[in-house]
Amino acid sequence: MVSKTTSNHKTVGVIGAGSFGTAIANILAEKNHVILYVRTKERAEEIKATGKSADQELNPNIEISNDLETIGNRCEVIFPIIPSANFRSMIKDLSPFLKPYHILIHGTKGFDINVSRSKINSRNKLSREHIRTMSEVILEETSVVRVGCLAGPNLAKEISQHKPAATVVASRFEEVIKTGQSLLKSDRFLIYGSQDLIGIELCGILKNIIAVGAGTVAGLELGENSRSLFISRGLVEMVHIGKALGGNAQAFLGLAGVGDLIATSTSGLSRNYTVGYRLAKGESIGHIIESMEEVAEGVKTIEIIHELAQTYQVRCPITETLFRIIKEEMTVDDAHKYLMKFPFRAEIEIPD
């Protein structure tokens, strides 16, 4: 039996029962009744029977459902937290049950490609018009106007262990930011706000590339000096890519940028870091991806940014090198020797 809450908030929806989705659902359930959506009836029944999702005990205020109509009809505020590859199809399925009054705050750090790859050729190169952040997908596919995102150093396992953490709720609407803060803020989970929605989304997406690379540094046992060098050069690369895609430097220097970058580039709890570490230990990218329980968005992002960098003529040596590694055109060891000799550009320039 689900216990009643004393919150003034209505029922809140979370779509996606992965590690981060479950962690957010548990935080929300401390003050609210939550409906956690899972894709299949079989998975829903399993979670109901065990009281656990993604190895996390579920708060009794969480109700399990595999019906998107239930989420749309009963929840005014919804947190979609699923892999980018499935995001648009899920939003299309959810769309008939959404109204302009809904608020959607996603927690997905990846790109959607909204054009067939077969249509992209030498004359029609991949560009910003071909890719979407998840907030842009929501706006394209639904009648929802009030959209936001979560981004920051949010390693799900640490959140589930009630360790202190913080995140950024970004939206063009102050109401969305305040709603996210009201629902999520606690003594151990701080919530900052930003109206730079696209900039904050780009931070969360691009840091995954550098996290993969930082994992290779650790896997080769090159030391902390080397990893710090790599991360700092990676931040510069993130800023230059981000600016080419419509972001700004300031976003990358905050919690959702450098904060998230540090967490995911130094922890074995990070899926993207783990991919890099395993690559350095000699595993193939195919085997790594196949064996992982949850998606590491960085691999897909490396391929997308590699193409975009060529379109916009932005030199991205770390992304280019990681692309060659995952395509098995270069070994991890040779890649680091190459990067040590590369004439990296100047530091980040911040306008007055």
Image (tube, rainbow, N blue to C red):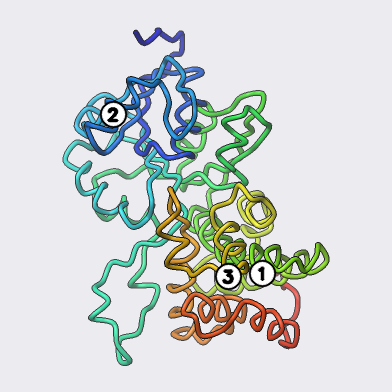
Q: Mark 2 points at which residue?
A: 44
- What amino acid is labelled 3 in the image? Gly
Q: Mark 1 points at which residue?
A: 234
Label 1: which secondary element:
helix
Q: Quadrant of the N terminus?
A: top left
Residue 169, image x, y percentages: 53, 42
- Asked if residue 12 is positioned above or below residue 203 in the image, the reply reads above
Question: Which is more foreground, mark 3 or mark 1?
Answer: 3
Residue 196, image x, y percentages: 53, 54
- Asked if residue 334 is positioned above or below residue 352 in the image, the reply reads below
Between the C-alphas of marks 1 and 2, the distance is 40 Å
Q: Residue 282 carries which label?
A: 3
Name the side, left or right, on which 75 lies relative to 311. Answer: left
Q: Quadrant of the C terminus?
A: bottom right
Residue 101, image x, y percentages: 29, 34
Tag 3 near tag 2, CB within 8 Å: no
Question: Which mark is first along the chain, 2 or 3?
Answer: 2
- Asked if residue 44 is positioned above or below residue 203 in the image, the reply reads above
Residue 82, image x, y percentages: 38, 46
Given residues 75 and 116, the one toward you in this image is 116
Furthest-bottom residue in view? 123
Tag 1 near tag 2, CB within 8 Å: no
Given residues 10 and 14, the one toward you in this image is 14
Corner quadrant of residue 346: bottom right
- Asked if residue 183 is positioned above or below residue 280 in the image, the reply reads above
Question: Which mark is first along the chain, 2 or 1?
Answer: 2
Label 3: which secondary element:
loop
- What amino acid is labelled 2 in the image? Ala
